[in-house]
Image (cartoon, rainbow, N blue to C red):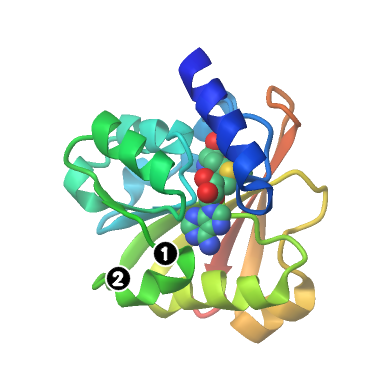
């Protein structure tokens, strides 16, 4: 959507360290990120939804709006998300607060938050998400790097194993998707 592209690009210029990408993710990435959500029960949380590419795909997988919570730091994106997705809980709060929003036994987290090469963010975002995740819950992360966005040392510290969902070339830039699971499951 041209409107999304304009808003996304404008917010990227205003907050380059937070928005990071040049354009919203493509529908192909959104479908790969959300694969398997139709089998998930319980709450679903999306962090860093931006203009809502993944949100649309999450709802299309059959997740009812009242099961979905969005955590987004950008106020302008939050306003647009509330307009577009009635019934979805949109919180203008950082992903680092995921364990303080009153949810337990989260079935899946869909993440557009840039966590690559920032160990403190990995602990605060991914580590805290797994404190409130269901045993079989999973965390899907988009990245533009060929490497897993969480190093093997950090996976070991957080007790996680990684599943590679491959590369989606139909995106600017091409995107890779990694899914993390607790090793206790
Ligand atoms: C690369 S954009 C991805 C947007 C969307 N998921 C997509 O793929 O089109 C990153 C998004 O994460 C948000 N963000 C960055 N840091 C965040 C944080 N700590 N908590 C929540 N949202 C954050 C930004 O405002 C931006 O909307």
Residue 98 location, quadrant: bottom left
The residue tagged 1 is 137
Q: Secondary structure at mark 2?
A: loop
Mark 2 CB lies closer than 8 A to ligand 1: no
Q: Secondary structure at mark 1?
A: strand
Image x and y of residue 65, in percent: 21, 42
Q: In the orientation shown, which residue stands out farthest toward the right?
A: 146
Q: Is residue 179 left or right of residue 36?
A: right
* Residue at the spot 77% in from the left edge and 65% down from the top edge: 117
Residue 139 seen anywhere in this rendered image of the structure: no
Image x and y of residue 72, in percent: 43, 53
* Residue at the spot 68% in from the left edge and 26% down from the top edge: 171
The residue tagged 2 is 105
Residue 13 location, quadrant: top right
- Looking at the image, tell me whether mark 1 or mark 2 is earlier in sequence order: 2
* Residue at the spot 17% in from the left edge and 41% down from the top edge: 87
């Amino acid at each position: 959507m041209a409107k999304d592209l304009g808003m996304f690009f404008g917010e990227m210029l205003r907050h380059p360290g937070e928005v990071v990408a040049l354009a919203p993710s493509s529908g192909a990435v959104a479908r790969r990120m959300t694969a398997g959500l139709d089998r998930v029960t319980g709450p679903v949380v999306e962090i860093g939804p931006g203009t809502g590419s993944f949100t649309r795909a999450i709802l299309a997988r059959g997740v009812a709006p009242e099961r979905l919570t969005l955590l987004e730091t950008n106020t302008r994106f939050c306003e647009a998300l509330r307009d577009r997705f009635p019934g979805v809980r949109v919180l203008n709060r950082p992903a680092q607060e995921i364990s303080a929003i009153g949810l337990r036994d989260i079935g899946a987290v869909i993440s557009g938050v840039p966590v690559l090469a920032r160990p403190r963010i990995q602990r605060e975002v991914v580590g805290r998400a797994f404190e409130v995740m269901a045993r079989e819950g999973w965390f899907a992360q988009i990245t533009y790097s060929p490497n897993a966005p969480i190093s093997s040392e950090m996976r070991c510290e957080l007790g996680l194993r990684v599943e590679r969902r491959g590369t989606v070339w139909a995106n600017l830039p091409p995107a890779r998707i990694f899914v993390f699971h607790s090793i206790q499951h």
